[in-house]
Image (tube, rainbow, N blue to C red):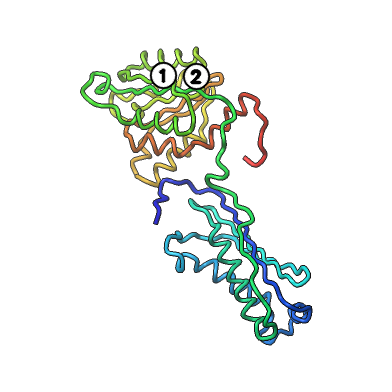
């Protein structure tokens, strides 16, 4: 199966539809009057649909087992058509569109099975996904034009005794999200130099200022101490999200001292110096958190975001 361990849990909603067509009004009357020989068509089909939803990953090998937290089936009769609607909800890392379509299809098959003894013309017309919410389809698309800077804080890299990997991976992530990386540099773990770089980026009105390294607990790690006094507004929610995301993947994430905050209209974020830690920290809060720049710049607020 596809690796989804890097994804975040989000609210996922999927709605699918299937249509069963019968050949006579007598069949519809039998359904409504609950006189079909095999029993109550809608109630039995609803039960079959629940099983279909739950067993989707058992039948489709690439489907991840998903904890479905809400299932609802609705039926509508329109002439000789029986419209089936299947709505699912969960909070998880991957979508549930296939589960919704499978649920709707199993309901349609069950209705077909129950009606074929009394109607030889019954047929399933179509099965389709009506809507979905969550995941990539709901990711915030940046409306504002954003600039960024990546500042790597490391004594060894600045001396040339080590190679920067984390900073360059951060740049790749930012460029993937269509941010312009206007500045990239490596400096030692010196509070005064870190603050100088921060003030320089603030003067240049850089939208996103990313500091990589110096958030640990070694004697020379001083990035939080340098940044904190200059922050105007801390954003604890983003800090907590970074640690929670990391904690789910390694117990050492609790030792990170990453901070996030605003100075004027610039967002400052400090990341661990390890490549994996830096990338995971970005994944924890972006691209969704880019929405704050639209708020700052007064871009029309989308109620669905």
Give the spatial CA distance, label 1 vs label 2: 9 Å
Residue matched to label 1: 183
Q: How many labels does the image show?
A: 2
Residue drawn at x 55%, y 71% is 51
Which residue sits furthest left?
161
Above or below 199: residue 305:
below
Residue at 41% x, 45% y is 6
Measured as percent of width and height from the top left, residue 300 is found at 67, 31
Taking the image as shown, residue 158 lies to the left or right of residue 242, namely left
Where does label 2 land, which residue? 206
In depth, the one of 254 and 10 nearer the eye is 10
Quarter of image, res 158: top left
- Please state the horizontal and vertical placement of residue 84, each as a whole percent of the image: 67, 66
Q: Is residue 188 above or below residue 124?
A: above
Q: Position of residue 198 (x, y in %)?
A: 44, 17
Q: What element carries label 1?
A: strand
Q: In this view of the protein, which residue sits in the foreground, 21 or 252?
A: 21
- The answer to which quarter of the image holds residue 291 is top right
Split into 4 quadrants, where in the image is the C terminus?
Answer: top right
Identified at 58% across, 62% down, the residue is 101
Q: Where does the N terminus fall, quadrant-wise?
A: bottom left
Picture quarter containing residue 31?
Answer: bottom right
Element marked by disc 2: loop
Labels 1 & 2 near each other (Cβ < 8 A)? yes
Locate residue 250 relative to residue 242 in the image: left or right: left
Residue drawn at (38%, 22%) of the image:
151
């Amino acid at each position: 199966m596809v690796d989804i361990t890097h994804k975040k849990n989000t609210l996922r909603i999927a709605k699918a539809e299937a249509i069963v067509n019968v050949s006579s009004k007598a069949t519809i009357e039998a359904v409504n009057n609950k006189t079909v020989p095999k029993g109550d068509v809608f109630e039995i089909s609803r039960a079959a649909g629940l099983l279909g939803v739950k067993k989707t990953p058992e039948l489709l090998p690439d489907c991840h087992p998903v904890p479905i937290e809400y299932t609802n089936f609705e039926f509508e009769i329109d002439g000789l058509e029986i419209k089936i609607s299947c709505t699912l909800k969960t909070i998880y890392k991957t979508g549930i569109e296939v589960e919704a379509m499978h649920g709707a299809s199993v309901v349609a098959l069950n209705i077909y099975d129950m009606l074929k003894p009394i109607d030889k013309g019954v047929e399933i017309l179509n099965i389709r996904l009506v809507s979905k919410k969550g995941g990539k389809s709901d990711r915030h698309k940046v409306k504002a034009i954003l600039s960024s800077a990546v500042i790597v804080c490391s004594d060894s890299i600045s001396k040339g005794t080590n190679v920067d990997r984390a900073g360059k991976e951060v740049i790749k992530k930012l460029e993937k999200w269509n941010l312009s990386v206007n500045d990239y540099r490596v400096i030692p773990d010196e509070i005064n130099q870190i603050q100088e770089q921060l003030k320089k980026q603030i003067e240049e009105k850089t939208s996103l200022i990313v500091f990589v390294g110096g958030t640990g607990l070694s004697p020379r790690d001083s990035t939080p101490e340098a940044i904190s006094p200059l922050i105007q507004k801390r954003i604890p929610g983003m800090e907590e999200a970074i640690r929670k995301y990391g904690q789910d993947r390694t117990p050492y994430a609790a030792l990170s001292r990453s901070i996030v905050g605003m100075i004027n209209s610039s967002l400052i974020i400090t990341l661990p110096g390890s490549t994996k830690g830096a990338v995971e920290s970005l994944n924890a809060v972006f691209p969704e958190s880019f929405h704050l720049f639209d708020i700052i710049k007064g871009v029309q607020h989308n109620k669905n975001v």
